Image (tube, grey):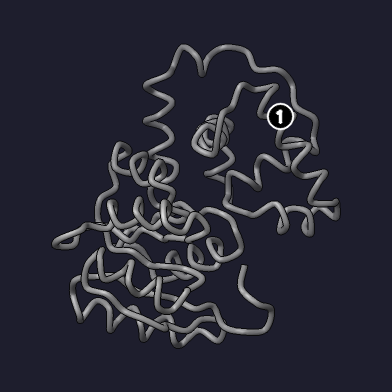
Amino acid sequence: MPEPGRPLRIVLADDHATVRQGLKLLIDAQADMQVVGEAGDGRAAIDRVEQFKPDVIVMDISMPGMNGLNATRTLKDLHPESRVVALTRYSDDAYLQELLRAGVAGYVLKQSASIELLQAIRAAAAGGQYLDSTVTARVTDRFLARDGTKARQPRPAATERETEVLRLIARGYSNKEIAAQLEISVKTVETYKARLMEKLGLRGRVDIVRYASEQGWLRES
Protein backbone atom coordinates (compact mmCIF):
# COMPACT_ATOMS: atom_id res chain seq x y z
CA MET A 1 0.00 0.00 0.00
CA PRO A 2 1.51 3.37 -1.00
CA GLU A 3 2.28 6.03 1.60
CA PRO A 4 -0.55 8.58 1.98
CA GLY A 5 0.06 11.82 0.12
CA ARG A 6 2.67 10.64 -2.36
CA PRO A 7 2.08 9.71 -6.01
CA LEU A 8 1.79 6.06 -6.99
CA ARG A 9 5.13 4.81 -8.30
CA ILE A 10 4.71 3.01 -11.64
CA VAL A 11 7.06 0.85 -13.71
CA LEU A 12 6.17 0.44 -17.41
CA ALA A 13 7.15 -2.74 -19.27
CA ASP A 14 6.54 -2.75 -23.03
CA ASP A 15 8.89 -3.62 -25.87
CA HIS A 16 7.71 -0.68 -28.00
CA ALA A 17 9.37 2.60 -27.00
CA THR A 18 6.62 4.69 -28.58
CA VAL A 19 3.97 2.84 -26.57
CA ARG A 20 5.94 3.39 -23.37
CA GLN A 21 6.27 7.08 -24.22
CA GLY A 22 2.52 7.42 -24.71
CA LEU A 23 1.76 5.56 -21.49
CA LYS A 24 4.28 7.69 -19.60
CA LEU A 25 2.65 10.91 -20.83
CA LEU A 26 -0.77 9.60 -19.79
CA ILE A 27 0.33 8.43 -16.35
CA ASP A 28 2.57 11.40 -15.50
CA ALA A 29 -0.34 13.72 -16.33
CA GLN A 30 -2.22 12.28 -13.32
CA ALA A 31 -1.68 14.12 -10.06
CA ASP A 32 -1.55 10.84 -8.11
CA MET A 33 0.81 8.87 -10.37
CA GLN A 34 4.44 8.95 -11.49
CA VAL A 35 6.43 6.68 -13.83
CA VAL A 36 9.69 5.82 -12.06
CA GLY A 37 11.08 3.19 -14.44
CA GLU A 38 10.73 1.58 -17.86
CA ALA A 39 11.59 -1.82 -19.31
CA GLY A 40 11.55 -3.36 -22.78
CA ASP A 41 11.18 -7.01 -21.75
CA GLY A 42 10.15 -9.18 -18.83
CA ARG A 43 13.61 -9.68 -17.37
CA ALA A 44 14.31 -5.95 -17.43
CA ALA A 45 10.94 -5.39 -15.74
CA ILE A 46 12.01 -7.62 -12.86
CA ASP A 47 15.25 -5.63 -12.57
CA ARG A 48 13.31 -2.32 -12.50
CA VAL A 49 11.07 -3.65 -9.75
CA GLU A 50 14.15 -4.57 -7.71
CA GLN A 51 15.61 -1.11 -8.38
CA PHE A 52 12.60 1.17 -7.88
CA LYS A 53 10.19 -0.80 -5.63
CA PRO A 54 7.10 0.48 -7.50
CA ASP A 55 3.53 0.36 -6.26
CA VAL A 56 2.27 -1.01 -9.60
CA ILE A 57 3.88 -2.60 -12.65
CA VAL A 58 2.08 -2.09 -15.99
CA MET A 59 3.12 -5.21 -17.90
CA ASP A 60 2.75 -5.79 -21.62
CA ILE A 61 2.26 -9.51 -22.16
CA SER A 62 3.79 -9.98 -25.63
CA MET A 63 7.47 -9.10 -25.26
CA PRO A 64 10.65 -10.73 -26.61
CA GLY A 65 12.79 -12.87 -24.34
CA MET A 66 10.87 -13.30 -21.12
CA ASN A 67 7.26 -12.41 -21.87
CA GLY A 68 4.95 -10.58 -19.49
CA LEU A 69 3.18 -13.72 -18.26
CA ASN A 70 6.41 -15.41 -17.19
CA ALA A 71 7.73 -12.15 -15.77
CA THR A 72 4.58 -11.83 -13.67
CA ARG A 73 4.96 -15.37 -12.35
CA THR A 74 8.58 -14.70 -11.44
CA LEU A 75 7.72 -11.40 -9.76
CA LYS A 76 4.99 -13.02 -7.67
CA ASP A 77 7.49 -15.67 -6.56
CA LEU A 78 10.19 -13.13 -5.69
CA HIS A 79 7.89 -10.38 -4.42
CA PRO A 80 4.40 -11.73 -3.61
CA GLU A 81 3.24 -8.21 -2.79
CA SER A 82 3.88 -7.03 -6.38
CA ARG A 83 0.81 -5.50 -8.02
CA VAL A 84 0.84 -6.18 -11.76
CA VAL A 85 -1.60 -4.72 -14.28
CA ALA A 86 -1.51 -6.77 -17.48
CA LEU A 87 -1.79 -4.74 -20.68
CA THR A 88 -2.63 -6.84 -23.73
CA ARG A 89 -4.54 -6.94 -27.00
CA TYR A 90 -5.75 -10.51 -26.30
CA SER A 91 -9.23 -10.90 -24.84
CA ASP A 92 -10.01 -14.63 -24.94
CA ASP A 93 -11.09 -16.21 -21.65
CA ALA A 94 -8.33 -18.84 -21.50
CA TYR A 95 -5.73 -16.09 -21.71
CA LEU A 96 -7.45 -14.13 -18.94
CA GLN A 97 -7.57 -17.19 -16.68
CA GLU A 98 -3.83 -17.79 -17.14
CA LEU A 99 -3.11 -14.19 -16.17
CA LEU A 100 -5.35 -14.42 -13.12
CA ARG A 101 -3.61 -17.64 -12.07
CA ALA A 102 -0.28 -15.87 -12.45
CA GLY A 103 -1.48 -13.29 -9.95
CA VAL A 104 -2.21 -10.13 -11.93
CA ALA A 105 -4.22 -7.47 -10.11
CA GLY A 106 -5.51 -5.88 -13.31
CA TYR A 107 -6.32 -6.87 -16.89
CA VAL A 108 -6.65 -4.10 -19.48
CA LEU A 109 -6.94 -4.26 -23.26
CA LYS A 110 -4.69 -1.97 -25.28
CA GLN A 111 -7.58 -1.05 -27.53
CA SER A 112 -9.72 0.21 -24.61
CA ALA A 113 -10.10 3.80 -23.45
CA SER A 114 -7.20 5.14 -21.39
CA ILE A 115 -9.44 5.52 -18.33
CA GLU A 116 -9.49 1.71 -18.05
CA LEU A 117 -5.74 1.61 -17.43
CA LEU A 118 -5.87 4.46 -14.90
CA GLN A 119 -8.71 2.78 -13.01
CA ALA A 120 -6.83 -0.53 -13.04
CA ILE A 121 -3.68 1.09 -11.64
CA ARG A 122 -5.59 2.77 -8.82
CA ALA A 123 -7.52 -0.41 -7.99
CA ALA A 124 -4.33 -2.50 -7.97
CA ALA A 125 -2.48 -0.01 -5.76
CA ALA A 126 -5.40 -0.05 -3.30
CA GLY A 127 -5.19 -3.83 -3.00
CA GLY A 128 -8.09 -4.66 -5.31
CA GLN A 129 -8.44 -6.19 -8.76
CA TYR A 130 -9.72 -4.72 -12.00
CA LEU A 131 -10.97 -6.38 -15.18
CA ASP A 132 -11.40 -4.36 -18.37
CA SER A 133 -15.07 -3.46 -18.61
CA THR A 134 -15.25 -4.33 -22.32
CA VAL A 135 -14.43 -7.98 -21.69
CA THR A 136 -15.79 -8.71 -18.21
CA ALA A 137 -19.38 -9.51 -19.16
CA ARG A 138 -18.44 -11.47 -22.29
CA VAL A 139 -15.75 -13.52 -20.60
CA THR A 140 -17.85 -14.39 -17.58
CA ASP A 141 -20.71 -15.37 -19.89
CA ARG A 142 -18.33 -17.89 -21.48
CA PHE A 143 -17.51 -19.30 -18.04
CA LEU A 144 -21.23 -19.66 -17.39
CA ALA A 145 -21.85 -21.39 -20.72
CA ARG A 146 -19.22 -24.02 -19.89
CA ASP A 147 -20.82 -24.68 -16.53
CA GLY A 148 -24.48 -24.16 -17.43
CA THR A 149 -25.86 -27.06 -15.37
CA LYS A 150 -24.23 -25.79 -12.22
CA ALA A 151 -25.31 -22.23 -12.99
CA ARG A 152 -28.94 -23.32 -13.24
CA GLN A 153 -28.94 -25.03 -9.84
CA PRO A 154 -30.86 -23.11 -7.14
CA ARG A 155 -28.66 -20.90 -4.96
CA PRO A 156 -29.20 -20.26 -1.24
CA ALA A 157 -30.68 -16.84 -0.54
CA ALA A 158 -28.25 -14.06 0.38
CA THR A 159 -29.05 -11.18 2.68
CA GLU A 160 -29.22 -7.66 1.25
CA ARG A 161 -25.94 -6.66 2.94
CA GLU A 162 -24.15 -9.82 1.78
CA THR A 163 -25.29 -9.04 -1.75
CA GLU A 164 -23.99 -5.46 -1.52
CA VAL A 165 -20.57 -6.69 -0.38
CA LEU A 166 -20.28 -9.36 -3.08
CA ARG A 167 -21.42 -6.93 -5.77
CA LEU A 168 -18.66 -4.46 -4.83
CA ILE A 169 -16.02 -7.22 -4.63
CA ALA A 170 -16.97 -8.34 -8.15
CA ARG A 171 -16.50 -4.77 -9.39
CA GLY A 172 -12.93 -4.65 -8.08
CA TYR A 173 -13.26 -2.69 -4.83
CA SER A 174 -10.92 -3.57 -1.98
CA ASN A 175 -12.20 -4.62 1.46
CA LYS A 176 -11.17 -1.23 2.85
CA GLU A 177 -13.05 0.66 0.10
CA ILE A 178 -16.15 -1.49 0.62
CA ALA A 179 -16.04 -0.90 4.37
CA ALA A 180 -15.87 2.86 3.85
CA GLN A 181 -18.67 2.85 1.27
CA LEU A 182 -21.04 0.74 3.41
CA GLU A 183 -19.92 2.32 6.71
CA ILE A 184 -18.93 -0.99 8.29
CA SER A 185 -15.61 -2.40 9.50
CA VAL A 186 -13.13 -4.23 7.27
CA LYS A 187 -13.55 -7.26 9.54
CA THR A 188 -17.30 -7.22 8.90
CA VAL A 189 -16.68 -7.08 5.14
CA GLU A 190 -14.40 -10.12 5.42
CA THR A 191 -17.04 -11.96 7.45
CA TYR A 192 -19.80 -11.25 4.90
CA LYS A 193 -17.50 -12.31 2.07
CA ALA A 194 -16.46 -15.59 3.74
CA ARG A 195 -20.03 -16.44 4.77
CA LEU A 196 -21.50 -15.81 1.33
CA MET A 197 -18.69 -17.60 -0.53
CA GLU A 198 -19.32 -20.67 1.64
CA LYS A 199 -23.09 -20.37 1.17
CA LEU A 200 -22.79 -20.13 -2.63
CA GLY A 201 -19.87 -22.51 -3.08
CA LEU A 202 -17.54 -19.83 -4.50
CA ARG A 203 -13.81 -20.53 -4.30
CA GLY A 204 -12.17 -17.31 -5.45
CA ARG A 205 -12.43 -14.04 -7.37
CA VAL A 206 -13.13 -15.68 -10.74
CA ASP A 207 -16.09 -17.51 -9.16
CA ILE A 208 -17.28 -14.23 -7.63
CA VAL A 209 -17.12 -12.47 -11.01
CA ARG A 210 -18.89 -15.41 -12.64
CA TYR A 211 -21.69 -15.27 -10.06
CA ALA A 212 -21.95 -11.49 -10.45
CA SER A 213 -22.35 -11.91 -14.21
CA GLU A 214 -25.03 -14.55 -13.65
CA GLN A 215 -26.93 -12.05 -11.50
CA GLY A 216 -26.54 -9.30 -14.11
CA TRP A 217 -24.58 -7.03 -11.74
CA LEU A 218 -21.73 -6.39 -14.18
CA ARG A 219 -24.07 -4.94 -16.79
CA GLU A 220 -25.50 -2.34 -14.44
CA SER A 221 -24.45 1.29 -14.89
202 in relation to 186, above or below: above
Task: Tell how many labels.
Answer: 1
Residue at image position (29%, 81%) is 22
- Looking at this view, is 25 or 52 the one in front? 52
- Could you tell me which residue is drawn at 57 percent across and 52 percent down? 172
Q: Position of residue 204 (x, y in %)?
A: 55, 34
User: Residue 6 appears in which quarter of the rendering?
Assistant: bottom right
- Name the residue nearer the viewer: 217 or 78: 78
- At horizontal 31% and vertical 69% (from top left) the residue drawn is 45
Other residues around mark 1 within 10 Å, as few (<14) / some (14–19) / many (≥20)? many
Say which residue appears at 78% left-offset and 37% top-offset: 191
Hey, which residue is sitting farthest right in the picture? Answer: 184
Above or below, 49 relative to 173: below
The quadrant of the rendering that contains the N terminus is bottom right
Q: In which quadrant of the rendered view does residue 97 lie?
A: top left
Q: Picture coordinates of residue 158 (x, y %)?
A: 75, 27
Residue 64 position, x and y percent, is: 14, 62
Amino acid type, residue under disc 1 in the picture: Leu
SS class, disc 1: helix
- Is 148 left, or right, of 127 in this rendering? left
Looking at the image, residue 200 sits to the left or right of residue 39; the answer is right
**Vertical side of 92 occupied by 158: above or below:** above
Q: Which residue is mark 1?
A: 196
Residue nearer the viewer, 175 or 45? 45
Residue that sits furthest to the left in the current view? 64
